[in-house]
Amino acid sequence: MIHELAVILAGRSNGRMHVVFAHHEPIDAGRARWGAIVRTLAAVAERAAVTWYTPDTQGRVQEYAVGQLGLTLPAGLSIRTLPSVHKRAGLTLNRVFFRAFRKALHGSQADVLWLRGDKLAAYFARKGTDIPLVYEAHLIGELWAEDRGDTPQRSRRLHELEQRIYDKAAGVAAITAGLLDEIRARFGYHGPAGVVPSGVDTSTFAPVWEGGDGRTVLWVGTLQFWKGLSTLLEALAAAPGLRLKVVGGGKAEEQQRLKADIARLGIGDRVDLVGRVPQKDIPLHVKSAACAVHSSPPEHAISARFTSPLKVFEYMAMGLPIVAADVPSIREVLRDGENARLCQGGNAASLAGALTELAGDAALAQRLSQRAVLDAQAYTYQERAARLLELFGRVAGAKG
């Protein structure tokens, strides 16, 4: 893939593709996706010229990259600040940023316009642009609305918004093969596309696992309902020999629900709530865990078919033995008995059994750990950037 990318770039007049990226929301250190966005931008900018339009100042971006990610941004990444009006509770008046961005793009010589925000992508699909639009898809909006219990009207509006994007997109990057299949079937998109899974920074998330303490199960991430934490708590209640360490946090109501569930199950003396920590500090908290867990519930489309979970790749790179739900999205990366132990999704008894087995079998844990570290090399941000640039090259070549 790297060789193919070199051929694509060498064929351009100046040897450097110019990619424009924009996202209308300001950086939120509490959301894991921002680590993925900034790391991906940095990796792409190592091989191409990237201009990033954002509500944040360059100083704010640098502060986040260094302070939270331990990342030095490359010279190939140019940051352009655009006006954006923010209402209370973090909401934005999107049209202010959208119009400023459209004006900034006027006369641009960029080869590709790369977007991952559905509202911004739909805006450009409606208004039109001379730059080929590549949309990075992370879910199906209408199914996500159903998962959240939104109204049918909301689901229908999201379908219409996404249909507008796929009718005009020159390329689509989907984070799982299942998501790309759904996009093609649901929206009739048949243009250039690629599967571009999430990535891992192997300089930050290097092998640190020390063999485990035989009893501590690790959870890293947010507390959203579709992450499967409730199943994990029930599994812990069924496995009295295990402890749980939670590194991460969520909204106030999610924190309250977590604490209430812990109290209801009577497992408070076996749960350690660390809270949020900078991403660069996560390895410090995982060294002695017996195993890590990703318990995706099968009833939600986003977790069963469409997620490419950052924490799974981070677990792999750090060498943590993993127990994960046996759902299609996870099977694209993990294989039972080879680089992880898979169990029945949504089944607390199955999860408890797998956790107990892995925590108590040092030889199995070591074997899974070693394989996971090797497999993680296929999911670095450099590999992610190569996949994106290969797609950008096809799209820009089609335009030429």
Image (cartoon, grey):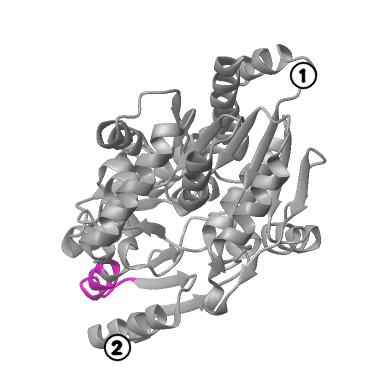
Above or below residue 119? Residue 233 is below
Q: Residues within 10 Å of mark 2 (few under 14, many from 20)?
A: few
| Element marked by disc 2 | helix
- Residue 320: tell me if it is visible: no
Q: Residue 137 lies in what quarter of the image?
A: top left
Position in image of residue 387 (x %, y %): 54, 28
Badges 1 and 2: C-beta atoms under 8 Å apart?
Answer: no
The quarter of the rendered structure image containing the N terminus is: top right
Residue mark closest to the camera, 1 vs 2: 1
Position in image of residue 38 (x %, y %): 65, 50
Above or below residue 28? Residue 159 is above
Please state which of residues 267 and 332 is positioned toward the viewer in this rendering.
332
Please state which of residues 255 and 215 is positioned toward the viewer in this rendering.
255
Please state which of residues 337 and 329 is positioned toward the viewer in this rendering.
329
Q: Residue 155 lies in what quarter of the image?
A: bottom left
Under mark 2, the amino acid is Ala
Q: Is residue 392 left or right of residue 257?
A: right
Q: Is residue 289 left or right of residue 130?
A: left
Report the disc number at residue 263: 2
Report the disc number at residue 15: 1
- Residue 35: tell me if it is visible: yes
| Element marked by disc 1 | loop
Total marks placed: 2
Position in image of residue 84 (x %, y %): 66, 64
Position in image of residue 70 (x %, y %): 72, 56
Segment colored magenta: 231-242
Above or below residue 142? Residue 178 is above
Under mark 1, the amino acid is Gly
Q: Is residue 260 magenta?
A: no
The quarter of the rendered structure image containing the C terminus is: top right
Q: Residue at x 59, y 16 (%)?
A: 397
